[in-house]
Image (cartoon, rainbow, N blue to C red):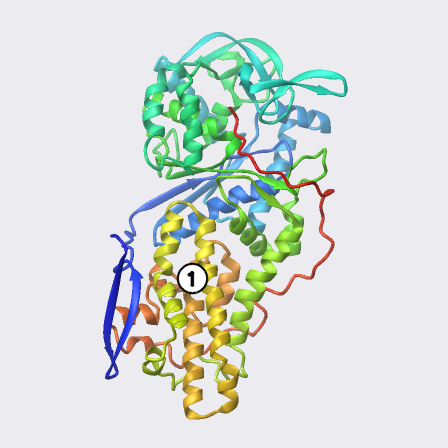
Amino acid sequence: MAAIAKMISHQFLGRKIKLIFKLKLGFRAVHQSSQFSITTPIFYVNAAPHIGHMYTAVLADTIHRWQHLLGRKSYLYTGTDEHGLKIQQSALRQGVEPLEHCNTVSQTFRDLFTTCGIDHSDFVRTTEPRHRDAVQNFWGVLESGGHIYKGTYEGWYCTNEEAFLAEEQTHMVDEGGTVNRVSLESGHPVQWTIEENYLFRLSSFQQPLLELVKKEGFIQPSVFKTIVLGWLESGLPDLSVSRQRSRLPWGIQVPGDSAQTIYVWLDALVNYLTVSGYPGNSTNWPISCHVIGKDILKFHAIYWPAFLIAAKMEPPKHIFCHSHWTVEDRKMSKSLGNVVDPFDRIQKYTSDGLRYFLLRNGVPHFDCDYSDVKVIACLNDELCNNLGNLLSRSTAPSLNPEQTWAPSDASWEDFLTNLSDEDESLINQLVNLPEVVSSHMDQYNIYKAMDSILRVLRDTNAFFQRRTPWNDRKLGTHETIIRLNNTLHCTYEILHVCGILLQPMVPNLSNSLLSHLGIPSHSRTYQNATRSAFHRIRIGETGKERQMKGKRFLGERKELFPRILTEKPQSVQPVKSKKKKLKVQK
């Protein structure tokens, strides 16, 4: 339903009160039987996780938790990608067997996800027997359908990207007097490789892929849709889907051919089928949303849908692609020593603190920049000063000695008939906030949803300052106490709604906020956010806005988010800021 602007004349306690609300009528209907499934890519275990891996996982987790908030059953799948030449080489350098290396690094990813609150439903490893069975079965389906054939493939192979690259995807660089050919995307060296292996008839799927990618919302944000269309319109060569086992023994063998190993990306992509129960009775298929980084866009937007179409299976409903994190405008790199360790930063800023910063500052359609200075400034301003201080000030015993949700002599009649323009604007924002946030979340624009919530909190702080409740308490007259209690109740209503809507982004912090306000766990859904006192007045449910009266706050009083003391940031040498450019594998 389209948003409308409606003047509501409401007779309340004998007085005519006029409030303007710009909102959608009613609230979103949520069917409890509906299901949602979302995935991260499975993460490559050639090295320990960095801040970019955490960002991808937190994006998916936030969308997953949002679906729960709406009342839907939601499933989040993640895991580790453990085959390929890079893994083989990493294990060799460490003097361990590949599986031992994979066990160690995969556990590190599990530990990170536990630490930062990733609520995953399944964690798959490509070295598991269930995954091997799924991959070999899927290969058999493609082969029996005539989509795989044996031939000779040659091209520039990049070990780091585990992919053959076209000539235009590489360029020559002078490295200390030696000229080498490297990948345009990653900068890693490539080698001319000629192999006899199996190929997938990718060229046969150009038209159905074009039709799929052109569907509204299939690839988000739209800038990545444009890039994929460019790839498709330039033509698709057939794709190598195996490597000679003499070169790559660490992988899943091609069924019936002991001399060939299944290409690591075909192997990895099938993980999405593995977690659905394939090749048995698949559940939660198709996947509702794949969350990926832009460096693997081609694999997910072209190769994966083509494989599925060939196997007569439905492609994913959506692909949500995000850009990368730089560090002080430079790409994260071991050689530069600027790889950001998420475990270290979680210790400094807390799990929810780091989640908040990444989600608040991460804009999917262009690269975003990380620095400790930015993190500290963001968290101190928004979580400590804005949200934390508002809760602390409004629930202080000096203002609310009863420590109850709504003091007994609060008068909505007085409050609603004496609204300033700023107060009326704030209430309108609050009433519309759940639908505004929902609209942004539907488009996976988490940063916009958070900005909407933050704007309401900033205006509430200004409201609280304008109303000077400390003066009302000091004067202590009947009239000033009523005014004080109205101010407090309004502030609690706003904190209640904002706390509910922030749960997917910062689950621990929101839980602390809502628990302090005495909100029971069963009253923290999206529907509850649409049922504040102001929403109920809007639909004419007079009297029900008083149902929280006398309810005591819960838990001990403590800072919601303590201020982070400024320290010398961990950083590389500062460089002159450069205009960010979107870089995607071509």
**Residue visible at 34% across and 54% down in the picture:** 71
Image quadrant where residue 348 sits: bottom right
Q: Tag 1: residue type? A: Ile
Report x, y in % for residue 123.
Answer: 50, 40
Report x, y in % for residue 325.
Answer: 58, 41
* Residue 61 against residue 309 in the figure, above or below: below
**Residue visible at 37% across and 63% down in the picture:** 529
Image quadrant where residue 328 sits: top right
Helix, strand or loop at label 1? It is: helix
* Residue 575 against residue 184 in the figure, above or below: below
Q: Which residue is more in the foreground, 390 or 351?
A: 390
Total tally of numbered discs in the picture: 1
* Residue 183 against residue 510 in the figure, above or below: above
Q: Which residue is more in the foreground, 153 or 428?
A: 428
Report x, y in % for residue 261.
Answer: 53, 17
Q: Residue furthest bottom?
A: 477
* Residue 431 against residue 411 in the figure, above or below: above
Report x, y in % for residue 50.
Answer: 62, 41
Q: Residue furthest front?
A: 421
Q: Which residue is mark 1?
A: 500
> Looking at the image, can residue 487 be seen?
yes
Q: Which residue is more in the foreground, 441 or 148?
A: 441
> Looking at the image, can residue 551 be seen?
no
**Residue visible at 38% across and 23% down in the picture:** 306
Q: What crowding class fits label 1: few (fewer than 14 Cα within 10 Å), some (14-19), or many (20 or more)?
A: many
